[in-house]
Image (cartoon, helix red, strand yellow):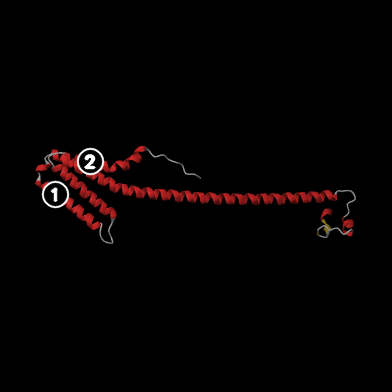
Amino acid sequence: MNEPILARHWLTLAAPKAAPAVATSTVLILGRIWNANGAEHSVGNAALMVVLTAGAATAGAFASTGCAGDPIIAGTAFATSGALALAGVAGYSDGASLPLLLWAVATAVAYGLAARYWRTDRREALAHDRDTDQRRTEQAHVERVEALRAGAQIEAARAGAAYAEQLATALITRATLPGYDPVQLTRAGLPELPVADGKYLTDL
């Protein structure tokens, strides 16, 4: 049975493509709001942002090295470090030129990293579709072969039943012919009819 084909909404298809730009834009907007509320004059907050950015970068470096390194944790840590750095620059810069430049760079880097995962997902999806189509083709071939085999068996059974019916009709018809005598046929050298319980089948 064929599976129903469901068309996904265009928002569902566009959401993953817009996610990197939405993320970097959100960080930029929050940084500029922070700047409007006097962030550039707060030394303590600036120091905290530097410490958090360095800590996230260090965590990403540790997570990406060694035999037990996890690429997901490393990517998350480096993304967090980049977001904190962008937020810090957007919050503590006097003008908007540098924050916008960093936003463009961060967005381009985010799309470059995301494109790698999108290609991997696309290859896996294509491989899954090919494997599914191959299994369906093989299953359909097996079903066709079994259907042909069952049809041949049914036709053979029908042919056997028709032959038996025709043979029985011929024997009955021959037995009703005038002057038919199986003993005379035997004496003439013709094949003897099969017997059951000592009687000729035609005499039953």
Classify mark 1: residues with Cα within 10 Å, few (<14), some (14-19) or many (20+): few
183 or 86, which is in the foreground? 86
| Secondary structure state at the residue bearing disc 2 | helix
Residue 183 screen position, x and y as percent = 88, 57
How far across and down, in percent of the image, does residue 43 sit? Answer: 9, 46
* Label 1–label 2 contact, CB within 8 A: no
The earlier-in-sequence mark between 1 and 2 is 2
Q: Which label number is shown at residue 26?
A: 2
> SS for tag 1?
helix
Please indicate whether residue 20 sits to the left or right of residue 43 in the image: right
Residue at the image position 36 percent from the left and 37 percent from the top: 10
Q: Which residue is mark 1?
A: 48
For the residues labelled 1 and 2, the Cα–Cα distance comes to 20 Å
The circle drawn on residue 134 is: none
Q: Give the x, y percent position of residue 78.
A: 23, 51
For image coordinates 56% across by 50% down, the residue present is 143
Q: Using the rendered view, name the quadrant where residue 192 is placed.
A: bottom right
> Is residue 15 shown left or right of residue 7?
left
Instruction: Determine crowd level at label 2: few under 14, some 14-19, many 20+ residues with C-alpha closer than 10 A.
Output: some
Amino acid type, callout 1: Leu
Up-down relation of residue 66 to residue 23 (above or below): below
Most extreme residue toward the bottom is 67
At label 2, the amino acid type is Thr
The residue positioned 67% from the left and 49% from the top of the image is 155
Task: Give the side of residue 102 with respect to residue 3, left or right.
Answer: left
From where the camera sits, is residue 137 visible? yes
The total of numbered circles placed on residues is 2
> Could you say where residue 66 lies in the image, as x and y percent from the top left?
26, 61
Q: Is residue 204 visible?
A: no
